[in-house]
Image: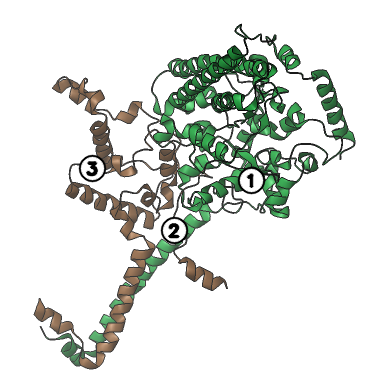
């Protein structure tokens, strides 16, 4: 064979043949490239929301026009018909269930009214009607800060964006009562431009930042829990500005949060019976869930509280956020092959045993508060009382940490049992110290506990004038409809 | 070989043109390598499977299933040894790539024969403990193997609703624009 150069020299048309072959090959490679690009563009178009929702759109209905399935299922959070043994979507008057709580929260608004919350749909209604937010006469005259609104509505990020985070927290709760209309919904967790999950509340972002973690780097699976952790966590209002803050800097468990609060000498209120400086636990759902087996196996909140749902030929995330016990077949049974009855039994077994110990702790704490009162009444000094009051503070914090997180007994049963066990130990420690103090004063008989057999009796015992409080609230609700518009 | 190579070498005055031409063809080749994310197919990451958006339904139904802790390749490629594994990946991958390029994907994607066999074996590979009791003798073994696990376990793991259009709003990590961020930023300004 001759060299190609030689061939082309002899037959110049051969050069043209090679030229055209190369051209055709390149042409087809180009076609392949553009086909790949076309299909990649399809992917971008498919993934782009076909919705025109502006930034900070707080009206859930607007989102619902584009995402009908998700919106319709979200609206079902209005359902209040499901009752499980300890929870569900129906309102439960917790103070009626356990009047001891009235004593435990004496001097704090929770002793007036504490009901198990209904679904997200009622977030705005329920914060307005609860006796805890009192009855301000005029907007801006109440004791509650605007911070109380933070988790109730997608209007909050909108307002924070408009006026700044700091100055939002600085206002009074009633200032925004006519401004905040939409209950917890779409914009709380979704970015309107991409529909991706997003964090809209500053406290979680700030806690991550302080602890050197980057929220931009977490996986989609973690986001499916973190959007919930914007609110379903332990938090406190820092300083006079009532700046909402997560106490996570030393760790996220009950002991480390306790250390954090002790270090800054934080207290929510001074107990009106025992005079102990108390901490009120909020709802450390995310913290407790993180310590359970399901979190350790990589599950997110949404896996059980928002499972996949099929309707006709479509599948979508069920936005009816609720107790998985009302939807066992789409939640537990995705992984567990046991029958519904058996799964329910397993959950109730854990809840029953923890409830039993929790009630023991509740009753002991009531005794401790009254025994402290007796010691004060018999002339004990602040120095005498300090060790006992610290034990009471820590013990009740532990009780509240376990009690305020409604799913706790299932989310992390072993940790919750440990929390209650240390609570019992600390309460008894306090009572031991108090009995020594009383013994020195010559008191050896049992301290009398007033009648707290019902919610009403307990409220009377701690000095609450409930008829007046309720009348004022009714007047406020009436005025809200007519005068506050 | 060497001789043949020397024969197609252009004369000296054409060297420059030939180098540039070859560069263009290879550049185009690398461009295809880049936009098709060809390197990602060496991994076992589930995100690779949604390089083609028609797999979005499969991805998202798996993501919500009891088998989420595993990855696609735990079930869908054989695990005897490295060679068998990558040979299967290459063969199956090329088939998928051809179908996708020629737009031949059906409305509801189903496994082909080779895939059925591999998945069946992988069910056994992990769930052996359960089957140990069942494989008492040759007759029983044959009887069990004559059926696919998912003939009964129909929801495992992708569920029964899984056409191309059955997950309209699913958030799936589909590939984004191949234009690097700094460039799209430059182009915008």
Q: Which residue is mark 3?
A: B78
Can you name the residue that lies furthest to the right here? A483
Residue drawn at the location 67% of the way across and 9% of the way down: A453
Q: Which residue is mark 2?
A: A39
Percent from the top left, x then y, of residue A178? 80, 41
Q: Is residue A466 visible?
A: yes
Q: Colour of chain A?
A: green
Using the image, determine if residue A182 lies above or below residue A269.
below
Between disc 1 and disc 2, the foreground one is 1
Using the image, determine if residue A309 lies above or below residue A376.
below
Q: Colour of chain B?
A: brown
Residue drawn at the location 27% of the way across and 83% of the way down: B19
Circle 2: element type: helix
The C terminus of chain B: image quadrant: bottom right
Front residue of A332 and B148: A332
Q: Are marks 1 and 2 in contact (CB under 8 Å)?
A: no
Q: Is residue A109 left or right of residue B183?
A: right
Say few, some or many: other residues with alpha carbon within 10 Å of mark 3 (under 14 / 14 to 19 / 20 or more): many
The N terminus of chain B: image quadrant: bottom left
Q: Mark 2 falls within which chain?
A: A
Can you name the residue that lies furthest to the top here? A445
Front residue of A292 and B111: A292
């Amino acid at each position: 064979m001759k060299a190609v150069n030689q061939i082309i020299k002899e037959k110049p048309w051969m050069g043209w043949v090679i030229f055209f072959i190369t051209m055709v090959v390149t042409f087809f490679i180009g076609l392949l490239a553009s086909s790949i690009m076309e299909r990649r563009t399809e992917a971008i178009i498919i993934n782009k929301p076909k919705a025109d929702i502006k930034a900070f759109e707080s009206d859930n209905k607007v989102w619902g026009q584009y995402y009908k399935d998700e919106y319709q299922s979200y609206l079902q959070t209005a359902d209040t018909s499901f009752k499980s043994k300890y929870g569900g979507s129906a309102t439960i008057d917790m103070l009626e269930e356990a009047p001891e709580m009235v004593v435990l929260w004496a001097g704090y608004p929770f002793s007036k009214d504490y009901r198990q919350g209904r679904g997200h749909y009622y977030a705005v209604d329920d914060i307005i009607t609860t006796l805890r937010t009192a009855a301000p006469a005029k907007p801006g005259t109440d004791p509650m800060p605007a911070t109380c609104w933070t988790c109730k509505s997608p209007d909050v990020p909108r307002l924070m964006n408009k006026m700044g985070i700091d100055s939002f927290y600085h206002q009074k709760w009633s200032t925004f009562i006519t401004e905040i209309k939409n209950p917890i919904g779409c914009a709380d967790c979704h970015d309107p431009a991409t529909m991706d999950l997003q964090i809209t509340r500053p406290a979680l972002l700030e806690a991550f930042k302080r602890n050197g973690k980057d929220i931009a780097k977490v996986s989609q699976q973690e986001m499916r829990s973190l959007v919930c952790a914007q609110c379903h966590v332990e938090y406190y209002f820092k300083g006079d500005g009532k700046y909402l803050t997560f106490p996570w800097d030393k760790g996220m468990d009950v002991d480390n949060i306790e250390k954090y609060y002790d270090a800054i000498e934080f207290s929510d209120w001074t107990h009106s019976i025992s005079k102990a400086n108390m901490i009120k636990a909020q709802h450390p759902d995310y913290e407790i869930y993180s310590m359970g087996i399901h979190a350790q196996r990589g599950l997110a909140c949404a896996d059980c509280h928002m499972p996949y749902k099929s309707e006709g030929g479509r599948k979508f995330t069920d936005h009816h956020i609720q107790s998985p016990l009302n939807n066992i077949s789409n939640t537990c049974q995705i992984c567990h092959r046991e029958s519904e009855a058996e799964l329910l039994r397993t959950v109730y077994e854990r809840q029953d045993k923890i409830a039993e110990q929790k009630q023991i702790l509740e009753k002991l704490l009531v005794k401790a508060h009254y025994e402290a009162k007796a010691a004060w009444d018999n002339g004990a000094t602040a120095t005498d009382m300090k060790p006992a009051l610290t034990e009471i503070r820590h013990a009740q914090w532990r009780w509240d940490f376990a009690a305020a997180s409604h799913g706790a007994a299932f989310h992390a049963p072993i940790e919750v049992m440990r929390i209650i066990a240390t609570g019992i130990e600390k309460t008894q420690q306090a009572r031991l110290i108090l009995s020594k103090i009383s013994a020195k004063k010559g008191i050896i008989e049992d301290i009398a506990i007033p009648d707290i057999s019902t919610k009403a009796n307990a409220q009377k015992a701690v000095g609450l004038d409930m008829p007046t409080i309720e009348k004022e609230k009714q007047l406020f609700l009436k005025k809200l409809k007519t005068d506050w518009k | 070989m060497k001789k043949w190579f020397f024969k197609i070498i252009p004369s000296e005055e054409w060297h420059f043109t030939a180098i540039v031409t070859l560069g263009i063809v290879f550049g185009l080749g690398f461009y295809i390598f880049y936009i098709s994310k060809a390197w990602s197919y060496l991994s076992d990451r589930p995100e690779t499977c949604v390089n083609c958006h028609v797999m979005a339904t499969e991805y998202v139904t798996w993501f919500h299933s009891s088998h989420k802790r595993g990855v696609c390749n735990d079930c869908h490629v054989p695990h005897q040894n490295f060679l068998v594994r990558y040979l299967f990946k290459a063969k199956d991958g090329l088939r998928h790539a051809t179908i996708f390029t020629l737009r031949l994907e059906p409305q509801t994607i189903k496994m082909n024969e080779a895939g059925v066999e591999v998945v069946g074996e992988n069910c056994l590979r992990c769930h052996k403990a359960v089957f140990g009791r069942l494989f008492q003798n040759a007759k029983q073994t044959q009887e069990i193997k004559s059926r696919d696990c998912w003939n009964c376990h129909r929801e495992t793991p992708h569920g029964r609703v899984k056409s191309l259009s059955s997950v309209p709003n699913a958030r799936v990590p589909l590939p984004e624009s191949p234009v690097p961020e700094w460039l799209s930023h430059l182009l915008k300004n």
